[in-house]
Amino acid sequence: MEDKKLDITSEFGALLEKDDIKVPQLGDIVKGKVVAASKSEVMLDIDGILMGIVRGPELYNEVEEFSSLKPGDEIEAAVIDEENENGELELSFRLVGQEKAWNKLRQAFKDKTTVKVKIVDANKGGLLSRYCQIDGFLPVSQLAPENYPRISGGDKSKILEKLKSFVGAEFEVTVMTLSEEDNKVIFSEKDVWNKKQKPALDKYKVGLQVEGKITAITNFGVFVTFGENIEGLVHISELAWQRIDSPSEMYKVGDKIKAEIISIDGAKVFLSAKKLLVDPWLEASAKYKTGQIVSGTILKINPFGLFVKLDEEIHGLAHVSLLNISVKEKITDLYQPGEVKNFEVVSISPSEHRLGLRLAGEGKESSKPKAEKVSKAKKGEEKEEGVDENKEEAKEEKKEKKAKVTKNVK
């Protein structure tokens, strides 16, 4: 009996040697024909000589190539055990699939082509994404405009709620960063959107008027969709000639708006609504004169002075040095938004959209300040106002970039 077993073994060895058949070793990639396939295991015939089995976590059902196998199909698998308890090769689709997936990501990164990822979770920074079984990240800043969570007021809980709504969805993306050593993969949906929009965007030039619908309102402006799903931003400073505190004072989502294209930066489009309106400052010098006493409503209080509304379109600045405030007094204790006061016009510059005021009713001497004092006050007012406006614009642009993570128009 023992001799017979030895004869069979030597015959099998002779057969392998004669046909130059290599016995698969641990880690080898083998190709086999599917004999039987179920949800729990797949049996493979390896060259008509050996049988192999793929089961459990090694099935890799996340990839269609491995999840829809049927008898007769040929497929590759990796050897993870040269002989299991049944004398079969223990095989893995997962190892082969992972390597194929990495190869596809490498190619997509190199050629800047797209892949589809599944969203598995979300956090405040973006979406946890998965390509096959390779995990990656899709930052908020790299979302396409239609998926960007523009929440008025920047409510973080609502932003996260919006991001969570994408769990289970598939996104078409490009690979921005690929580091296998760090197991770091960063995706971008915005790049895909930009490429698709370029042909449509090429039809538009700076100076062209467009009409669109407001799709989102933020603290720094409104987003408008026009043409072939092109999106542009009307910054708060470009909504109207007068100063406004919030775009929501003027518009709501769904409103139609006309604007002029003032800048195109790659796929980012910037618009101006006020350019289509008559500049009220062109007639300001005819309406207001230096020395004139006017009634104004305090709109906003800043450490350097008061922003005052003279009419619906013309606003002025009363510098703190012209409000007769003592060193120990605070401007916020003496004035309140909404108060109506009489002011004297001390300077007007229509080309710069600036009008300087002082508090009126201080007596003859104070109502007729020396030219030198007025000049100094005017310089101080212009300097402070300019600093404030620059700071506010810088703040808003910073918010815009952070919220889109950077500005993310298109």
Image: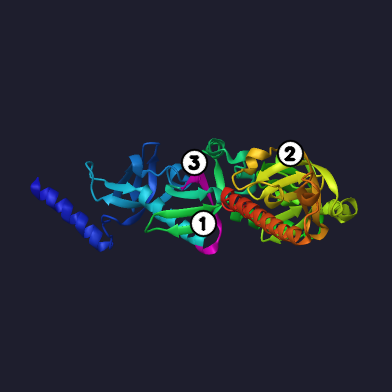
Residue at left offset 61%, top offset 52%? 395
The numbered mark, 1 or 2, whose residue comes first in the sequence reads 1
Q: Quadrant of residue 257?
A: top right
The residue that disc 1 covers is 175
Q: Judge whether residue 127 is colored magenta.
A: yes
Distance from the alpha carbon under mark 3 to that under mark 1 = 18 Å
Magenta region: 110-131
**In front: mark 3 or mark 1?**
3
The residue that disc 3 covers is 122
Q: Main secondary structure of the magenta part?
A: strand
Picture layout, residue 367 above or below residue 382: above
Q: Residues within 10 Å of mark 3 (few under 14, many from 20)?
A: many
Nearer the observer, 154 or 339: 339
User: Mark 3 and 1 residues: CB-CB less than 8 Å, in contact?
Assistant: no
Residue at left offset 89%, top offset 54%? 283
**In front: mark 1 or mark 2?**
2
Q: What's the mark number on residue 249?
A: 2
The location of residue 187, given as percent across then percent down, is 51, 53
Nearer the observer, 365 or 287: 365
Residue at left offset 31%, top offset 48%? 91
The kind of residue on which mark 2 rests is Glu
Distance from the alpha carbon under mark 1 to that under mark 2 = 40 Å
